[in-house]
Image (spheres, rainbow, N blue to C red):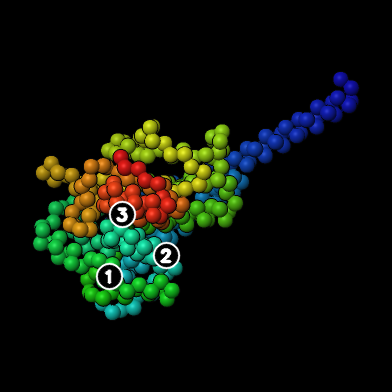
Amino acid sequence: MNKLRWGILAVVLVVCAALFFGFVLHNEEYTGQEFMFDTLCSITAYGDEAQNAVEAALERAREIHSITNGFSGDSEVSGINSAKAGEKVKISRDIAKILQTARKVETASNGAFDVSIASVVRLWNFDGEGRVPSEKEIAEALSRSGGEKFIMDFDEGLVIKKEDGILIDLGGVAKGYAADEAVKVLKEHGVQGAIVDFGGNILCFGKNPNSDDGLWRVGVQKPFAPLGEVDEENIIEVSEAAVVTSGTYQRYFEKNGEKYHHIIDTATGYPANREYSSVTVVAENGLVADCLSTACFVLGKEKGTELAKSFGAEIFFK
Ligand code: ADP
Ligand code: MG
């Protein structure tokens, strides 16, 4: 080989190496996981800044967990819950955004979704051993729920209760919002593609480097199957979307051969027993999808489908 050929070969090798390392760096993958919102929250991101981005996104989710966690005495939600009627409770931008969307879905679903169902949810003790409350207890707790019992001023960032003893529970919505905020942080860090999975609330965006067409394939958890076992016949292909599932298998207890799950029919105060076990909503953002998945579960197939459509979302019942 003469010098020219060696030269050309060297240039080709350098170009190939640059392309290869560029590709590898470009596709740097990092997964971070943390137990929050009473579930495993996991983020996988691709790009040069993947690790920093994932850590910052988890930090942001942690922040949202700490303000929405009703079990922690010093959270914002606990501040609202312990306030007396007429007291002006100052709320953060985050809580205001969550409550504003929750209120929209509450109105659109005729109260099937209602964060003030908290008094009823507590009676059932789904987070502990579980117990079946008496009809009297349920009736009393139902009398302490209903969005009309609050004045919410989102511009001023204020919540005022009209009666004492009204509680809120953001369990049906906080994870969706946290996942949205995690995505925002990932994008700010220049991540080129990522999948955020907060216990069945799945958000993805950008390019999936592990698929030829760059799309993400999201499997829906098989009800009552081991965690991670998905329904192969129902794989949802998306480029950027929130795929959120509410199911009876996520949190329930059994008493005298009956299963009692954690999605409450606001009309009765009892678990919403329907002919399906899960509802999956595909929407533009996690906050809306999370409210809708719970709302549509309660509403049933016909009205639930109508509600999802009115928000431009797709819906699947399983
Ligand atoms: P998960 O939290 O398992 O993803 P959901 O998003 O459907 O499931 O939320 C269920 C949680 O929402 C319950 O644990 C409870 O805290 C709360 N909740 C239950 N029923 C309702 C309802 N009808 N409206 C609003 N929140 C509800
Ligand atoms: Mg929900």
Image-based side of 102 in relation to 52, left or right: left
Can you say whether 71 is above or below 55 in the image?
A: below
The x and y percentages for residue 8 are 83, 28
Q: What SS does tag 1 mark?
A: helix
Q: Earlier in the sequence, mark 2 or mark 1?
A: 2
Read off the residue under disc 3: 295
- Which residue is at a point 30% across and 40% down the rendered structure image? 318
Image-based side of 106 in relation to 206, left or right: left
Image-based side of 162 in relation to 47, left or right: left
Q: What SS does tag 2 mark?
A: helix
- Which residue is at a point 41% across and 60% down the rendered structure image? 64
Read off the residue under disc 1: 148
Read off the residue under disc 2: 97
Q: Distance of mark 1 from mark 3, alpha carbons?
A: 17 Å
Q: Earlier in the sequence, mark 1 or mark 3?
A: 1
Q: Distance of mark 3 from mark 2, alpha carbons?
A: 18 Å
- Which residue is at a point 32% across and 45% down the rendered structure image? 279
Q: Residues within 10 Å of mark 1 (few under 14, many from 20)?
A: few
Callout 1: CB less than 8 Å from ligand 1 = no
The x and y percentages for residue 107 are 32, 63
Callout 3: CB less than 8 Å from ligand 1 = yes
Q: Which label is found at residue 280?
A: none
Q: Residues within 10 Å of mark 2 (few under 14, many from 20)?
A: some
